[in-house]
Amino acid sequence: MENFSGKTALISGATRGIGRAIALGFLEAGAQVIGVYAGNTQAAEVFMEETARFAPQLELVQCDVASEKQVSALFAMIEEKYGSISILVNNAGIRRDAMLALMTSSQWQQVIDTNLTGTYFMTKQAVWLMMKNKYGRIINITSPVAHLGFPGQANYAASKAGQIALTKTLAKEVAKKKITVNCVSPGFIATDFINDLNQDLLAEYKKMVPMKRFGTPEEVADAVLFLAGSRAAYITGTVLDVNGGL
Ligand code: NDP
């Protein structure tokens, strides 16, 4: 495993599911981790207890990535306390599924605001710090629905496709500054995110996966840590699928 000591990683949605595994991966690899969550303080407290052995290496911050004001305050704190960050993982994401004909503008907007505009707010701030250092790794967690589509997920698919377009564009803008920008695209991963789906539907989805199983958060985290590491220095503007062959 690559050693990330001396590197500071900012991870959104770090207290549950995929983000939690990413945060743990970076902690185990020696990084300083700043983990962001939206409002589930109970999950944040549980994660804090589980990671007590890494105590000085982890700071959790409640911050809504969809709020430009809160993201600005987060980065003001980061600059004052840590100086800069080397790694940003835009992992926070939500679903508000409905067929488009029935989708409310609130369902549409909440998903776009969190998944896409949140990525923009976080990334814009991070890029300023990374450009000063002439180094950075940005990893955005997208989804296969960005190119496949999925009934009931027009808002979510649009937000995830937007993340890919943002990634490819920014990668070209900041390549000269030694900042790489990539996506990881997980398939079905067993987290709270898909817990609300009924068991029959989940069994159907499992059959669709060539490997006939859902992935684990740790399998996604491994891909993120690879892209954040020195061996991925020449990889930028790409999407790494972690989906069991979907
Ligand atoms: P979970 O629902 O398990 O966790 C989501 C995390 O994001 C939580 O920590 C939550 O904080 C945080 N979060 C949500 N909204 C905000 C916000 N506005 N500001 C800050 N933090 C926020 O999701 P997963 O771990 O499953 O998903 C992580 C990412 O992976 C998402 O972007 C998702 O779209 C993507 N993905 C997931 C797949 C899956 O099958 N699980 C498949 C493909 C992609 P809190 O706990 O406070 O609510």
Image (cartoon, rainbow, N blue to C red):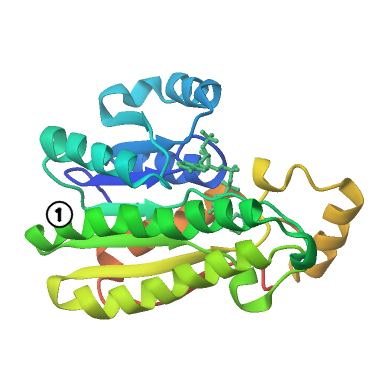
Residue 65 appears in the figure: yes
Give residue 62's position: percent from left, percent from top: 40, 30
The residue that appears at 64% across and 57% down in the rendered structure is: 105
Q: Amino acid at mark 1?
A: Leu
Category of crowding for the residue at label 1, using alpha-carbon neighbours closer than 10 angstroms: few (below 14), some (14–19), many (at least 20): some
Q: Residue furthest left?
A: 132
Give residue 30's position: percent from left, percent from top: 27, 40
Q: Is residue 89 above or below residue 178?
A: above
The residue that appears at 16% across and 70% down in the rendered structure is: 178
Q: Residue furthest front?
A: 105
Give residue 115's position: percent from left, percent from top: 50, 56
The residue that appears at 29% across and 73% down in the rendered structure is: 170
Q: Is residue 232 above or below residue 221?
A: below
224 or 66, which lies in front?
A: 66
Q: Which residue is mark 1?
A: 129
The residue that appears at 46% across and 60% down in the rendered structure is: 116
Q: Is residue 36 left or right of residue 101?
A: left
